[in-house]
Amino acid sequence: MTAGTRAPSIKKALLAGIGALVAFFFMAPYIQMLITALSPADELVNVPAQYLPSRFEFSNFVTVWEEAPLWGYLRSSLIISVFATLVVLVVALPAAYYTARYRYRGRLLFLLLVLITQMFAPTALVIGIYREFVIIGDVFPAAGVNTYISLIIVNAAFNLAFSTWIMVAYFSTIPVELEEAASIDGASRLGVLRRVTLPLALPGIITATIFTFIAAWNEFVVALTLAQSADIHPLTVGVTTFVGQYRVEWQYLFTSSLIAIVPVVILFIVIEKWLIGGLTAGSIK
Amino acid sequence: MTEARIAQEQEPPERRPQPAPRRRRLPDLGPLPWIGPALLLIFAVVLWPAFEMLRTSLSEISASGLSKGFTGLTNFERLFADPDLVGILTRTLTWVVIVVTITILTSLALASLLNAAFPGRRLVRWALIVPWAASVVMTATIWRWMLDGFYGIINRILLDLGFLQGPINDWLGNPSTSFIWLMFVAIFVSLPFTTYVLLAGLQSIPKDIYEAGKVDGATGWQSYIALTLPLLRPALLVAAIINMINVFNSFPVIWAMTKGGPGSLTDTTTTHMYKLAFQLLDVGQSAAMAVVNFTVILAFVLLYLRVVDWRRA
């Protein structure tokens, strides 16, 4: 893939041209989302559609907060995603480390179990999950249906597989000899973990963390069924309130969608360089 | 020498030498303290509901959700007696095969592009991240709006390019075009992840292999077929499996764009089971659909692993 010595600039220009087209293709829907979000409502019902509105209605981004309880949706999305991510880390880190380091009885079974959890459609499980939390709610009302705790637990469980898998792959790439050397130098088992293993596995841990966060942030089906009252609706479910039976308030729908999308895109771009490493570890395994 | 190194890296962890027990310093409690919490979570949120799904599929459930006892295969008989089911199953298979195949082939081209050096590559990678980071519901919704029969921008563009006679064309309301657009959007949201997995695979291929190929006189295409594709095998395998499962179980694209309509003409097994449970309140039949769905995915994945001979990967 190194650039040839002959006419490298023409080849590069051609690639850059194709690259620009690809970038435009993937950005186009979101550009249209922004244009719609900035359009006055009455200009969205022209046939045929206009490419650009006659004026940009920046006030849509202000009024949308009055049209729907966006702060509440944002707060719910944050609570669910942050705590689901913490639960995944606390649960998946030790499991992944032990599975990568020791060949215990049932190790293969455990890995198989993790794989199988990925194969169930959330839509298929949602009925069983709903009933389970109805029962749990009878005993512990704080963890029943329509509570943050139920949403956090379900989101954590759904993302456990991918995180465990990525981290097992990552821990496996760290030579055991490195840990042994540190422990011969007198470090305790936990000291070895803290000072040698975890720092080396950090790219994998970060990848798993961000993945879980974003998956929980974007989760839809479980929230649609488990979160019934509007005050715990996350953004994904909340924005659908702009889709009425007869009328859709497109400009508000997309204003709030953009408010949900922009922070995660930034988060994703920040970890982009670790992403490649994290996914390589996953695929090489 | 390099190939030996790769071969060693690809060896599954089971075959690695394990540290001897005598080096452990904590009292040995076995694996349970380490994997126990993960098992608990998997059991509570996946296995138990899955078992419940199986039990429900064999029970008679009233519309209010109460179980009236075991009924054998009645739910399955009712499911298969539905004349729409054949269409739904065929559509689901078409959906999976077409979306996954086109996604993998396009991602291969995109990953090769993003692996080459050119000005602005970084920006193209960032652009590709956007559909990945954005929620699928929201992406599907913007496509629904762009495809709107009256006010959609796509009608305007096609009209200006001379492809349409009149300004009104209901892409999603027309059964002959709606499913094609749904597959298009499903491919659109699947491309970024797949491309990144393949890109990661490409970047793990050492550059000196290509130098060696060049010395042996391989042209660009030849080295792509003979060197790149075989070395990309593990990444391709992973990308294809994850895609297959995700596309099979995909709910938000169809739900946000057509809700399976018109009628049930764009329903797949996933939206069908959701409608059965939450619109028709026929939980038993929905569970039967879920069981069939899981069986088909499992068969699909096992068949695929067999065809590609995964132990070789």
Image: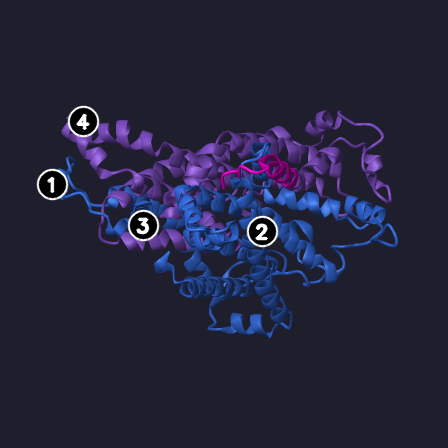
Chain colours: A purple, B blue
Few, some or many residues within 10 Å of mark 2 (<14, 14–19, 20+): some
User: Circle 4 sits in a helix, a strand or a loop, which is it?
Assistant: loop
Look at the picture and state if A183 lies above or below B67: above
Image x and y of residue A137, in percent: 45, 44
Q: Which of the two labelled residues, at mark 3 and mark 2, occupies the earlier sequence position?
A: 3
Which mark, residue A158? none
Secondary structure predominantly adopted by residues drawn in magenta: helix
- Reading the image, the residue beneath label 1 is B22
User: Circle 3 sits in a helix, a strand or a loop, which is it?
Assistant: helix
Q: How many marks?
A: 4
- Reading the image, the residue beneath label 2 is B106
Q: Amino acid at mark 3?
A: Ala
Look at the picture and state if B299 lies above or below B246: below
Residue range highlighted in magenta: A1-18
- Reading the image, the residue beneath label 4 is A187
Q: Which of the two labelled residues, at mark 1 and mark 2, occupies the earlier sequence position?
A: 1
Q: Residue furthest left?
A: B22
- Reading the image, the residue beneath label 3 is B7
Quarter of the image where one finds residue B179: bottom right
Q: Are marks 1 and 3 in contact (CB under 8 Å)?
A: no
Image x and y of residue B280, in percent: 63, 61
- Residue name at image x 66 percent, y 54 percent: B182
- Between marks 1 and 4, how big is the CA–CA gap? 16 Å
Q: Are marks 3 and 2 in contact (CB under 8 Å)?
A: no
Q: Amino acid at mark 4?
A: Ala
